[in-house]
Amino acid sequence: MNVELKDIHFNYGKITALDGVDLALSEGACGLLGPNGAGKSTLLRILLGFLSPERGEGRVLGYDIKKEQFLIRRSVGYMPEDDCLIAGMDAVTFTAYFGEMSGMPRQEAMKRAHDVLFYVGLGESRYRLLETYSGGMKQRLKLAQALVHDPKLLFLDEPTSNLDPQGRNEILDLIKDISSKKDIQVLISSHILPDIEYTCSHVVILNKGKVAAQGDIEALKEIQYSLYEIKTKGENGGFLKALKDKGCRVEETEDQIMKVYMPANLSRNEIFQVALRENIQIRYFVKSRTSLEDLFAKTVGVD
Amino acid sequence: MVISEQGYVHWQGTFIERRFPWWPITRLGIRLAFKRKFFKFVFSISLLPAVMFSTGVYISERLDDFQFMLKGQDRLLEVNPAFFKSYFTSEPLLFLMVMIMVLAGAGLICDDLKYNSLQLYFSRPLRKRDYVLGKMATVFFFLLILTLVPGLLFVLLKLIFAGSFKFLANYPWIPVSVIAFSLLVTLFFAFYTLLVSSLSKNRRYVSILLFLVYIFSNVFFGIFYSIFHNPYFCLLSIQCDIQQVGAAFFRQSPHYDVPWIYSFLVLAAICCLSAFVLKRKIRGVEVVK
Amino acid sequence: MTAVIQTKNLSKWYGNVLGLSDVSLEVEQGVTGLLGPNGAGKSTFLKLITGQIKPSIGHVAIQGQDVWNNYPLFGRIGFCPEQDAFYDEMTGWEFMTSLLSLYSFSRADVQSRAEKALDFVELAKDKDRLIRGYSRGMRQRLKLAQAVAHDPEIIILDEPLNGLDPLSKRKVIRLIKDYKEAGKTVIVSSHVLPEIEALTRTIILLHQGKILARGDIHYIRDLIDKHPHMISVKCSDPRRLASSLVGEPSVLNIQFGPAPDTVVFETQDRDKFFGLIPRLIVDHRIDVEEITSPDDNLQAVFDYLVGK
């Protein structure tokens, strides 16, 4: 277990931020979701040892979160949400500097800084002054400083905010590559659900200071009944009628997608037989799953 | 033949325990200071008083060579505690120290606040006191070059030029005073700089504030003194406070008839205030109210 | 349908920096998504059509009237800028009422509108707090509230979903769709393509200051000849299905994987391909789990056009 928390409580004065959080993460990438004020940032801060929980206990990478915060921080990389830099520096010095802060020997930190900057795609501009960096480059720089000391646990807070579609894809691919290494646990907090779906296999949903749901994304999205989403081309009046005759319940949505509830005795092949008979093209055929967004809304308890 | 692995690669080295975890911060502060415009210029100017006083030491010993300047006076210059006092409390030197602070010290904390880099520091194994120590040591570095180093150099030069230990025999406490007063002034300026630097996110404000507080504390003293003729107003002025304490350290009579301990307490109070503010301002996380 | 917003040869330079170059288009009622990489000219475009800056060349007309210096027209436009633009020392309530009183509403009207708008973005509870203490999401919602409080006909939103949590996003998306139903014109820019997809199928894609594509997403996709359509089939016997399609000239490429039960076809003629598929599935008794088009979405359109 890389992260294990039991019954964590934390208050800011009178405001309860975390109200009994239990968490267990083993490996791979995990998404941390929750509405504003659900306690995501507080949880990250506790895991990093910025804050000490008022009640409860936990271990990160085997270290106690109350007593061994120093050891935790040595093996944890943190990519904060807002832009961070030091004016008047270039990327190599900056990254190496924070490597040294983590306890790397100076020369090693310098060597590693170059490696990491090439990895995040800042190789060409690594001697430029940080003030001249664009938003996307600052984002990569933050990732580089989080990776420089080769952490075993990586916290990413809104890693794709303020990026354009290309920049976002590139960062997401980097995150995916990092988390494909079995020995690095990545924890991503984000409001952009498609990003979480793309990079993470697990998800933890926080609400009102409690864990509202956690587990494998695919498993959480699975629904029990046999519902298919179908998109067709052609005159589908006859197709619809034939499906209804076979006992299916059909709903049409605004995006020209049909939602077909199939009775248990009907096989998927029969739908294609109907399509063949009615001379209909089936252009899209997918077993319906709850979208992560619906799942989120349902867990958080709002429609 | 090998194709090395693409993508993310682990680092194979091992971490070290630094004896002084704050040292990289100090090194960075010094490096960034030298990158600033004017800094090199101001810093070299601020070494001038030391050069002049060194020359003074030379002249005082080689009077024969400078008879033409004597013009009937008995002695041109004597290296005595007053000589040290006048170096350490000279207005140009104090002013130049403030200028160095403005250029090298203003951004120390305020830039970190502005660019949100505190959270990067504190997500590493670094204590708050290491951070403050690192920043302070930057100030120490520059100011000790202007105080401690010349002070000890004067003693050394005096001994070399005189060729005897008479000077030390006369004033055995001088080196101790030099060290103690250098540390005191430097410590005060370090606290003062960090205090002002942590008050704002804007470097320009900090620079102006550092400068103005120093100048205006002096100006106010001048105004009040000329109205009320009460020497106790000298406590208002940072410059006078340092001068009063300096006089006491070098066993000279203070310029104003106020016990030096009061001035010392004023300086200490500013340091305490600074420590308090720093403790509150420097945190890894912004707590949303 | 008549065009609500019309631009002709719209161009803008800042000194020698290109903002927008030769954009002629018409925006109709409904929701239009505005996309493009950073620096493509999105914000410039939005500022031009809201009359905040003067075009170097060309015209913008809203409902037939020229926009530049046309103050009565501004009352019909709501604009939510990308950057924060607040008076930090004001409360949310003061901010809303002071902005609203710039329009010629009565005092009571100003109050009720401000209340309604704040209520809508769920800031009613925090309206008496200073904006300085607002979180990023709250600031975003306040910006949105001031854009819609005066009930404009044309709503222009620059990155409105940025920084919102998924629930607020959902609400805003629903609201924008409501505006569409009410016959208003909404232009939304965003960097997050799935969000645009959830809102609309009509897009304007800007790149290097020019229009790269405009219209319906799927229609645009069909026009991209360079990249054949990809069709992914997940089924019980992908190799059998593939072997019976190998001889088909419209199939350009067949690729297996990454999952063992998946095969991806590339074809230039989707109609023909989809016409063939049901027959094969039925004849070979293949149990099809999924048929999808992985590159028939906005992300693919964007990548193909902007060039990765």
Image: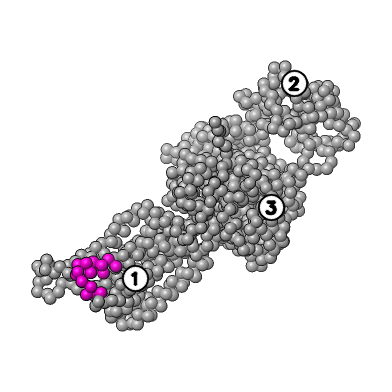
Which x, y percent locates residue A198? 66, 41
What's under tag 2, amino acid-wise?
Answer: Ser
> Mark 3 — on which chain does it sit?
A
Which x, y percent locates residue B252? 28, 79
Residue B154 among those drawn in magenta: yes
The one nearer the camera, A295 or B178, is B178
> Mark 2 — on which chain does it sit?
C
Residue A147 among those drawn in magenta: no
The local secondary structure at tag 3 comes to loop
Q: Residue C183 carries which label?
A: none
Q: Badge 3: few (under 14), some or many (20 or more) residues near its Cα, within 10 Å?
A: few
Marks 1 and 2 close (CB-CB < 8 Å): no
Q: Badge 2: few (under 14), some or many (20 or more) residues near its Cα, within 10 Å?
A: few
What's under tag 3, amino acid-wise?
Answer: Met
Q: Mark 3 points at which residue?
A: A1
Real-space CA distance between mark 2 and mark 3, rounded to the nearest whole angstrom:
46 Å
B207 left or right of A65 in image = left
Looking at the figure, which quarter contains the N terminus of chain C?
top right
Q: Can I make out residue B252 in this image?
A: yes
The one nearer the camera, C191 or B175, is B175
The one nearer the camera, B227 or B264, is B264
Q: Mark 2 points at which residue?
A: C243
User: Which quarter of the picture shows residue B234?
Assistant: bottom left
